[in-house]
Image (spheres, rainbow, N blue to C red):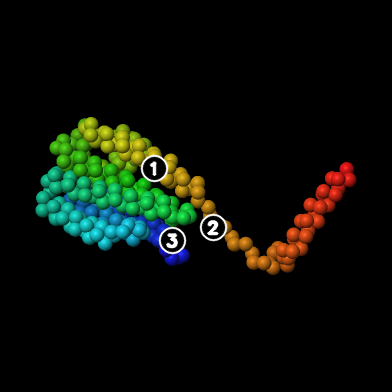
Amino acid sequence: MPAGEPLRRPRRYGLLLIALIVFYLLSALASGWAVQAGQLVLVVAVTLLALQDTDFPHRRLARWSTLVGTVLAIVLVASSHSPVALGTASIWTGLLLLATVVIIVDSVLRLDTVTVQSIYGALSAYLLIGLMFAAFFGAIDGLGGAGFFAHGESANIRTYQYFSFTTLTTLGYGDFTAGGSFGRAVAVLEALTGQIFLVTLVARLVSAYRAPTRQDPPPGDCAGGKAEPPELARWADFGGSAGVRQRTASR
């Protein structure tokens, strides 16, 4: 691997984090099949961006599989607005996000040093986990036949994401709760995933992060002017330690 490559690749995680924030905000502003189709397009962009930063041996096949599967999902959603079609597209979205999380975490763990971009990558994976579970909640709602939320609360992309991130962060306002047993089990799994992710990967990266240190001045440059030659420094250390031994012996 070239010497400059480990520094070049992690820099893209900042762009990925910005793309995810924009992705979340766009999804939170509107709902409907058109928004879900646009969400799929953004998920593909995020997945392809993450594939650029990995050593996955079959990246070309992964790119084509992502594009073909997404086109089929968009066609399915556009041709049929049924809950089953929306649920199927949500499953594909969740699987893409899951694959992207695995790619990012693997790339971050392979880095030799922890930098700011490494932390950006971990935060991006954390956001992707919340979006992934939101997609799975939509799939459960579309394919389950019954409403996902208890008490007949409205279910759309915005409420799925809101419920997902309040569950991921264990905030739990209580205004939205899963109605079915399977939805509740997935919500518990998300809460556990969020806590384990924070206390392991993110906490480890933050604790191992060190700000770039200043390089030592070249020989001959020091605060007092000229640096002491190494030979004189060794003789001074030897003389000092010999003097200490001599004074100790005289006592």
Image x and y of residue 24, in percent? 31, 50
Mark 1 residue element:
helix
Residue at 14% from the left image edge and 47% from the top image edge: 85
Labels 2 and 3: the sequence-earlier one: 3
Alpha carbon separation for disc pair 2 and 3: 16 Å
How many labels were placed on the picture?
3
Asked whether, in this view, residue 199 is left or right of residue 87, the answer is right
Alpha carbon separation for disc pair 1 and 2: 26 Å
Residue 158 visible from this viewpoint: no
Labels 3 and 1: the sequence-earlier one: 3
Asked whether, in this view, residue 49 is left or right of residue 223, the answer is left
- The residue to which callout 2 is attached is 212
Image x and y of residue 36, in percent? 21, 51
Q: Amino acid at mark 3?
A: Pro
Image x and y of residue 225, in percent? 73, 67
Between circles 3 and 1, the one closer to the viewer is: 3
- The residue to which callout 1 is attached is 197
In-front residue for pair 161/203: 203
Between circles 2 and 3, the one closer to the viewer is: 3
Residue at 31% from the left image edge and 59% from the top image edge: 57
Can you tell which quarter of the image residue 214 is in?
A: bottom right
Mark 3 residue element:
helix
- The residue to which callout 3 is attached is 6
**Pointers 3 and 1 in contact (C-beta within 8 Å):** no
Alpha carbon separation for disc pair 3 and 1: 24 Å
* Residue at the extreme front of the image, as rendered: 249
Residue at 22% from the left image edge and 43% from the top image edge: 138
